[in-house]
Image (cartoon, rainbow, N blue to C red):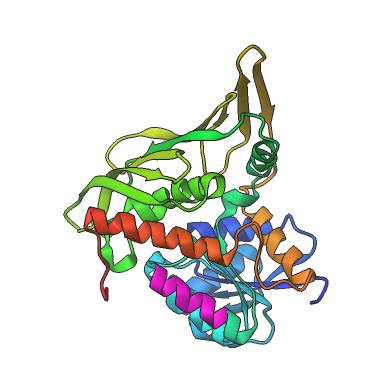
Amino acid sequence: MADVLRWGILGTGRMARAFANDLKLLPDARLVGVGSRSPEGAQRFGEEFSVPLRFGCYGELAATDQVDVVYVATPPALHCDHALLCLQAGKHVLCEKPFALSATQARSMIDAAGSHGVFLMEAMWTRFIPAVVHLRHLLAERKIGAVQLLLAGGAFIPDHDPDFYLFRRDLGGGVLLDAGVYLVSMASMVLGAPDQVAALGALGNGGVDEHEGMVLSHAAGPLAMLHVSLRTRAAPDLTLLGSKGKIHVAAPIFSPRRLTMTIPGEGEDVQDFPFEGSGYRFQAAEVARCLHDGRLESEVMSLAETLQIMTTLDRIRAQLGVTYPGE
């Protein structure tokens, strides 16, 4: 793999823009291509971020031999098709969360990466944020003992324009796949795969989930109690309760910069983890590290765990009654 990784971005929305800005902070990364559903969109994005290759068709970005890896940042309903488009063209892929709409789609993407011998990773950027990296060290050292309860949740009220993607089934809308995926992923990182899943919630007029609570239980006893909503407002944070103490992960849970560990009799230990940019660059650096080492997946965000998380999301959706076109 070349010293400088040549990136392409498929999509030109909010996440694509944040990723493009963060790539500027990596000396071994260069944004060379963008693919949009229209020539005008590609041109605007290309001008803003000085991208030399501007394609008004997704397939043209996948086909060019001047791009090494593609960040897929289109709406959730398109993740599978667009990742497959790139994987089958021999491109390495970092696919925005939710990785897919279902475990079935996720499996097809993973199989395609394997058959074409290319790298694939879910863009669960939270895993690579410095505070979360340190959290894993604290847990590995059992600083708070065995985790017994994981409490996490958040809520926000988006624009209620019926065409907003979160309210559209055809685009893979709903609060679970948009925001709840962070909670389920954190629960997976800390506690592993759940044995049982229980979920209650409410659907909106568009048929997507807008409000829910979930409990994930594990054979050894730990519980993850999660909530997420589009009907009220609450800062998204997380608390881990262990046998010896607790750790609070400050909001926003998807990009935290502060951890507070409390041990009875020892007081609070507050640690801050500031960083430049939005936080997207850390996952891009992980892609570069893996490719430099000849790895086709990340051990931090493995494909097996991504598939397991998608399976858990499927189980939650089934209980909520959320389905997407084609299922």
**Which residue: 27% across, 48% down?**
210
Choose top left, top right, bottom left or bottom right for residue 77.
bottom left
**Which residue: 61% across, 26% down?**
260
Residue 145 position (above or below residue 61): above
State the image coordinates of residue 223 (x, y, percent, origin top left): 43, 39
State the image coordinates of residue 89 (x, y, percent, origin top left): 58, 87
In front here: 9 or 144?
A: 144
Say whether residue 34 is magenta.
no
* Quarter of the figure with the C terminus: bottom left
> In the image, 261: left or right of 191?
right
Say whether residue 107 is magenta.
yes
| The furthest residue to the right | 3
**Which residue: 30% across, 35% down?**
232
Q: Residues in magenta?
A: 103-113
In front here: 190 or 110?
A: 190
Residue 78 seen:
no
